[in-house]
Image: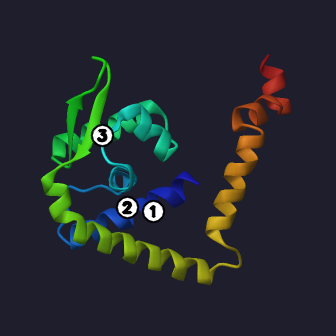
């Protein structure tokens, strides 16, 4: 799975560079989409919206901040930081949205070549892992039992 993700992510990154978004990473799009939909958010709320860990959201936001795609302001409490899109990102939205559209179309074309729906398969995997986490599945194996 990691290999497939690396291939897809790498190709999206190369396409982004092709259209002039050299410093924009595919992993930024969920942040941009969440902020467009919900407005400025605390990193904790952003992580929830994106269904990732706080640490993963925080790392992505830090990269985006260094690249000038988001701004960070203090929240109500000193530990909280509120993430907002910058004017630069808003100016780039037509390109970012064009990439989203192109990627969505390319995904549909890829799925048309497969004997099953990639999206449905991924949704099924997530549902199965919500029922029983992979860590539990690993722990139930014979090999894991022998380690204990």
Q: Quadrant of the N terminus?
A: bottom right
Q: Secondary structure at mark 3?
A: helix
Residue at 53% across, 60% down: 4
Could you say which disc has been placed on residue 88 in the image?
none
* Separation of marks 3 and 1 at Cα, in angstroms: 23 Å
Could you say which disc has been placed on residue 61 in the image?
3
Query: In terms of depth relative to the viewer, which is nearer, 2 or 131?
Result: 131
Label 1 Cα neighbours within 10 Å, binned few <14 / some 14-19 / many ≥20: few
Tell me where residue 66 appears, x and y as whole percent: 17, 40
* Separation of marks 2 and 3 at Cα, in angstroms: 20 Å
Q: Earlier in the sequence, mark 3 or mark 1?
A: 1
Q: Which residue is mark 1?
A: 7
On screen, residue 13 above or below 67? below
Label 3 Cα neighbours within 10 Å, binned few <14 / some 14-19 / many ≥20: many
Residue at 31% across, 70% down: 97
> Is 52 on the left or on the right of 103, as rendered?
right
Query: In terms of depth relative to the viewer, which is nearer, 112 or 34?
Result: 34
Q: Secondary structure at mark 2?
A: helix
Q: Which residue is mark 2?
A: 10
Tell me where residue 14 appears, x and y as whole percent: 29, 67
């Amino acid at each position: 799975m990691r290999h497939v993700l690396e291939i897809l992510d790498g190709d999206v990154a190369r396409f982004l560079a092709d259209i002039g978004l050299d410093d924009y990473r595919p992993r930024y799009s969920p942040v941009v989409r969440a902020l467009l939909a919900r407005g400025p958010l605390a990193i904790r709320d952003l992580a929830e919206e994106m269904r990732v860990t706080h640490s993963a959201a925080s790392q992505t936001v830090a990269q985006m901040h260094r690249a000038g795609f988001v701004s960070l302001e203090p929240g109500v409490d000193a530990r909280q930081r509120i993430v907002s899109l910058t004017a630069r990102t808003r100016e780039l939205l037509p390109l970012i949205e064009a990439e989203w559209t192109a990627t969505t179309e390319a995904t549909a074309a890829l799925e048309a070549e497969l004997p099953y729906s990639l999206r449905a398969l991924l949704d099924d995997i997530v549902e199965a892992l919500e029922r029983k986490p992979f860590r539990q599945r690993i722990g139930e194996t014979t090999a894991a039992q022998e380690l204990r």
